Amino acid sequence: MAGVAGSEATTISAAELTERLAPILAEYAGKDGAVISLLQDVQEEFGFLEPSAMTDVADALDLPVSHLYGVASFYSQFYFEPRGKNVVKVCTGTACHIRGAPAIQARLEEQLGIGPGETTADLKFTLETVNCVGCCALAPVVSINDRVLNRREQRKLKGWIQTERAEEPTSQEGAS
Amino acid sequence: MSTATEVICAPQQALEALRAFAADGMCGRCIPCPIATRQSIAMLERITSGEGEAVDLDRLTRVSTELIDAARCPKGEEAAKKLGEALASPEFARHVEGICGSGACAALTRYRVIPERCTMCGACQEACPRDAIEGDPFIAWRGDNKPYVIRLEKCDGCAKCVAACPADAIERVT
Amino acid sequence: MAKEITLHIDGQPVTVPEGTKILQAAESIGIEIPRLCYFEGLPASGSCRLCLVEIEGQSRLAVSCTQRVKEGMAVLTASDRVLRSRRFILELIWSTHDGDCTTCEKAGACDLQRYTYDLDVDKEKYGLYAPDEIPSDLGDPLLERNLRLCILCGRCIRACREKSQGILDFMERGMSTIVTTSLNRPLAESGCDFCGSCIEVCPVGCLVERDRKLRGREWEFESVETLCGHCNLGCTQVIDLAHGEIVRTRPGADGYLCVRGKFGWDYLSSDDRLTAPLVRNGDSLQETTWAEALARAAEGLAGAGSVAGLVGPNVTNETVKAFGELLATSFGSQDVGFTGGGVPFGALSTFGGLKALAGVGDVEKAKKILAIGPSLAEGFPRARLAIKRAVDAGAKLIVVDPNESELAAIATLHLKPKAGAEAALLTAIGKALVDGDLHNAEAEGVAEAIPAIRELGVPDAGVSPEAIAEAAKLFAKGKGVVVSSALTCDVLSRSAGLLMLTGRKKGALLPLHPSANPWAGVLLSAGASGDGAKGIYALGTDPVAAGEPPNADFLVVQDLFLTKTAEMADVVLPLRAFAEEEGTVVGAGGKLIAVNAAAPSDLPANWQILADLADAAGKPLPYKSIRDVRAAAKETISAVKGSLAFPSMNGAGDSEELRPYERFELPEPSWVARSQIRRGGSAAGVSEAKEEVAA
């Protein structure tokens, strides 16, 4: 099922999960029709829709967990697996395509060892392709965490990735 | 990629509209709309890539009329109505016949020699990678020089002949 | 009285109560409007669009499953416009439905197939577009989910929500929409309890029981309706047979079976079933003829001197009656014990007799429910459904359980007594009723009991007096029932006491027992001890497994399998299983409810085996047919009247030595180990009252 593969056991302890979830649940307590806002807050806090958090939210709202996943999987903004510290996006719009986006994508896929929509095992990189981001004059466009790289940065991308990889393992943080 | 130039034809417009609807506005929570959308997109993809058949036009017309009743919400109705309006264009039938007059569909773009303008220089024949152009060079003392002819079934719309022709004697088939 | 509306459908007048949907109104006059997503009993969603009808004066077609009738409406269910739309939708469905009617299990019972035929739909109109990634089998045990056949009607989602755990939903959106569990995890990891309610409502062949596959066509099946025998809630069970073998079971008109009723029938044809009598020859048991075995049994029991009988709760009334008659007539013994696995049926006789017995219908109509005991919802899903329905309809629920539980989560009041103190808590509630003057002073037998109750000390159950007072206040009035999976003498008798104090005497007490016919003990005259008996006949019961091995010179055992007790026996006789027997059981209100021989068996009927043994002993039973036995059973039962003695509300008989749930544990029925729902499927339906009690 495309896009909803789900993650394995979380690295967060049950106690920490409850603690971080509590203020979110408190804010929406008793509010009707707040499911989407609540899920957005959960994703902001954990970087994705953490499965244990989903169970707790379902209990708190007295809704079946399946209903929450039905709502969440309806919208492309929600992620069901942890995202990488660096979300690398390659634009595949017309202008970028003509200026070599496919080659850039292929090189990134090879270097990172993942395909579009996937995240590296060390949770450092997520690779995505996106439609036109609207700065075609800068084509081909590559962004990291939604900041478009300039020419120099693009040329040094390969080295930069190597450096990032060599650093200490990252702890899972919220999507920036 | 099916867009050879910035130009768009009616079938492609209809295809893009349905793709946009499928990606964004179509919820998929009633039975007819998502299936009709997917099938229509499949048919329009065939039509814009040269594999469309007359029966596809019948099916698309049926979708555009029946989905108005069958869809559960105004969004599906709107999509159906827009499709119906698009289908009024004669371009659809032309696509089924194998020609995209605006050149938007690379697979259906074909070129023809404008007989009155052809100087029979042979440049187009040399340029053509498909061996699609028939004709003999101009021989002054002969009285039966004929303009070159592009065989439609061999032409793949690459337009190299257009670039090569010094006399502006090649135009797109509409 | 609801206001009545008159309208016309296809020119015919029809009058129905206000609020009726057009589709239902049409059905009432025999007009079937095609539908794929609508299902009687589930909320309507109006998403398949097949039920669209034309209403005079309205430009848009109307959704007949959701739209209510209006006075003077003129509806056309099959106009040209409607038929065009219907055909269009069916054509579209066929373009994504990757199936072949020729080999599909649903052929003959498929709504899609039927409507396609009725409307002469062109299946090939849009060609087939079914991406390879859509799975044809999601690999779950017990049932197959073939998403290539799913038409996205959503019935399974609504059925699962209404009747079970609600684990399914539409996932993704647009053209990628599929119906599955959260994150598309396997059913067993998603909280599925394998009740099969989804299968019942699926209009096409997407959901199929694995055991049913390749076993026959729908039109070849013979169906027999009976009651499921896996617990005393007695859900109607329809058994489908092909070539004389069970292929599938389905719920009856009451619409629900749990995993045991739905998938727990395979033990009937287990290779381990006893099919022929055995007699002991030295160290081993050897197969022999019925004549030989019955002669040996008769001789052995007659020669033993004093004889006792033990019979279990999974047989029909007729079997129990014939058994008691056999012991009395042929072996001069009144010492026949009904072993319900430690359940004190005597508690019932102290209060209202069998009329007090409630059924699921009483629970669903109740306004006040007291639910006692461990794993109530998990062990008895039909009870869970009944309680949930009542609570949804506004009933107040008091849960007595030291643990958190599914029912506790929806309870109005959750009382958590100390481990082992459930009965003490009930006493405390009874006292609170009396002290607060909340009892029904006019109710029969109550006035005499009040003084003694006032004298009772308030036992410490680990629950605050405020909570106890609240429980008393809550439970005092309104149609009330007690549902209990905690089956000890003290809990049952005090539950009966609470009911009597509040004037509830009929259809009020529902002890939950994992057996088919736990109240049949009333057919036997006196409780048995079996002490000192030299000859013992154990029928459908396994004392060794219950921890009380029989100590006899001569032992006859009659059972489904070679149980531990049977291994010790001198004569072993095969037993016809509950599903294989025609007969009656004691149901709610003490009524006799008929069960049919739904599963095939080569054995004689159990009552017949007992009659033949009586013949072999030279003292035949007074029965010529099963009707005679039934009549005798009926007579015995109607003579059972509850005494009006008030049940004991104090500590006599309490035993707090055992860990609390050990007191409620019952020996596992012999079929469980031999059924797929234990081995490979989900064990969700089998009660496991082994939870650790929170300290």
Image: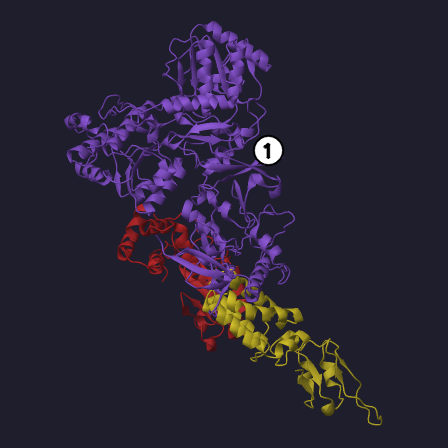
Chain colours: A red, B yellow, C purple
Above or below residue C351? Residue C310 is above
Q: Residue A69 placed where, x, y %?
A: 41, 54
The residue sitting at 54% across, 73% down in the picture is: B83
Whether residue C395 appears in this view of the structure is yes
Most extreme residue toward the front, as rendered?
C13
Name the chain letter of the residue that bears numbered label 1: C
Amino acid type at mark 1: Glu
Q: Which residue is mark 1?
A: C245
Above or below residue C341? Residue C263 is below
Of residues C617 and C46, the one drawn nearer to the viewer in this rendering = C617
Q: Residue C333 placed where, x, y %?
A: 42, 11
Q: Quadrant of residue C481?
A: top left
Q: Is residue A156 left or right of residue B108?
A: left
- Work out which quarter of the rendered image holds the C terminus of chain C and state it: top left
Q: Residue C227 placed where, x, y %?
A: 47, 34
Whether residue A123 appears in this view of the structure is no
Q: Residue A101 placed where, x, y %?
A: 52, 69
Of residues C222 and A98, the one drawn nearer to the viewer in this rendering = C222
Q: Is residue C605 left or right of residue A169?
A: right
Q: Is residue B123 left or right of residue C481?
A: right
